[in-house]
Amino acid sequence: MTFILREENLTLFFEYLEGKYELFAPVSETQHEAHFEKVAAKYVAFNPRLSPQGPKKFIFPYKRELFLGPGKKDKALVGLHFSDIAGIAILDKVFKYPIIDQEYFDVREQFLIVGMDHFTAPKDGYDLYLQVIDDYFLVTVGSPLGLKLAGTPLLIKNSKITSEKNLFHFDDILSHKRLSEAVEKSYGSKIWDDLSQRCFGCGICSYVCPTCYCFDVQDSFDLKGNSTRTRCWDSCMLSAFTEIGGGFNFRPELKKRIYNWYYHKFVRMPKEYGKLGCVGCSRCIVYCPARINYLEVLEDVVLEMEGKRGKKPLRVK
Ligand code: SF4
Ligand code: SF4
């Protein structure tokens, strides 16, 4: 179901949401970046800038004490880009199947999700989605809560306008099957040796990625007998991630950790969830200190495995 929101009513609409929720939206600090922060409704607008960590840090906090239980649904993440909503949809799947991770949903369900982007609404991962079109927004409802909120007179029921323009299909650009087969076949290839000479193994690509979810669980105690168990972000790119008691490490070599990062996103996740573990946000390219571009790596892998290196580019558009 869709509605129309006139541009001049945008602030009024966010003031309406502000009456029910604390708003968090991307705010520009520099010419190139935006950071998600608590904001007043009057400052919410479509922000084309990329935030380094996006909304993941809210729904899947960097560090959180376990067993706290659910909080109140009184916060709204607004102005999310298409790719960040696609990232949330992937995290929702990962933490739901095959076993529900209630610790994740205790936090995730505290947030109303309102997207805003030029692309046509994604399939899932949001409550309301505002597609920016000329002097109005096409508002798509993505959940029963979104439908309830769409009851405001600021939104006009739409039966005429459909928008297929700007349709964004990252999955089409990087075909699942071709990629998956090539990456799976490339285990032990020299490509991963070469890449390990350039990569610092710093894990930044995981921390900025909206779909990466590796975590560690740590216990701490004090001398008064208090103890806490916390869950905090980790990265499969880091050596300590696969180190177990006694010092044994399953993946001590960086080239194997790099291969695992690609294998998980482009082989395992399509097998397990029918989706790539990548939503094309480009953060891992922008923030990699070694300037590694995963698209160039994938292109090399596919061409090498298909015996076509140097003849045909992988990226069709
Ligand atoms: S951010 Fe770049 S250098 Fe750091 S682990 Fe990832 S690919 Fe390697
Ligand atoms: S482009 Fe990089 S950071 Fe963005 S979703 Fe894909 S792998 Fe993650």
Image: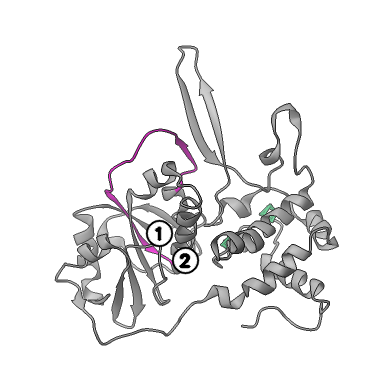
Q: Residue at x 58, y 65 (%)?
A: 276
The quadrant the C terminus occupies is bottom right
* Three-letter code for the amino acid on which mark 1 is drawn: Pro
Q: From the top left corner, tell me how far across and down residue 219 is, in percent.
A: 53, 26
The residue at the far top in this view is 224
- Apparent side of residue 148 relative to residue 238 in the rendered image (left or right): left
Q: Earlier in the sequence, mark 2 or mark 1?
A: 1
Circle 2 residue = 49
The residue at the far bottom in this view is 160
Q: Residue at x 69, y 40 (%)?
A: 242
- Apparent side of residue 192 relative to residue 265 in the rendered image (left or right): right
Say what secondary structure mark 1 lies in.
Answer: strand
* Three-letter code for the amino acid on which mark 2 is drawn: Arg
Asked whether disc 2 touches disc 1, contact meaning CB atoms under 8 Å apart, the reply is yes
* Residue 24 located within the stretch drawn in magenta: no
Observer-nearest of 254 and 91:
91
Say what secondary structure mark 2 lies in.
Answer: loop
Q: Is mark 2 within 8 Å of ligand 2?
A: no
Q: How many marks?
A: 2
Q: From the top left corner, tell me how far across and down residue 282 is, in percent.
A: 58, 65
Q: From the top left corner, tell me how far across and down residue 53 is, in percent.
A: 50, 54
Q: Residue at x 35, y 75 (%)?
A: 131
Give me the disc on residue 156.
Answer: none
Q: Is residue 286 visible?
A: no
Residue 70 vs 31, above or below: the answer is above
Please tell me in which quarter of the rendered image ligand 1 is found: bottom right
Circle 1 residue = 26
Observer-nearest of 43 and 129:
129
Q: CA distance from mark 2 to mark 1?
A: 8 Å
User: Could you classify mark 1 by the number of other residues whose Cα lies within 10 Å: few (under 14), some (14-19), or many (20 or more)?
Assistant: many
Q: From the top left corner, tell me how far across and down residue 245 is, in percent.
A: 70, 28
Q: Which residues are magenta?
A: 60-81
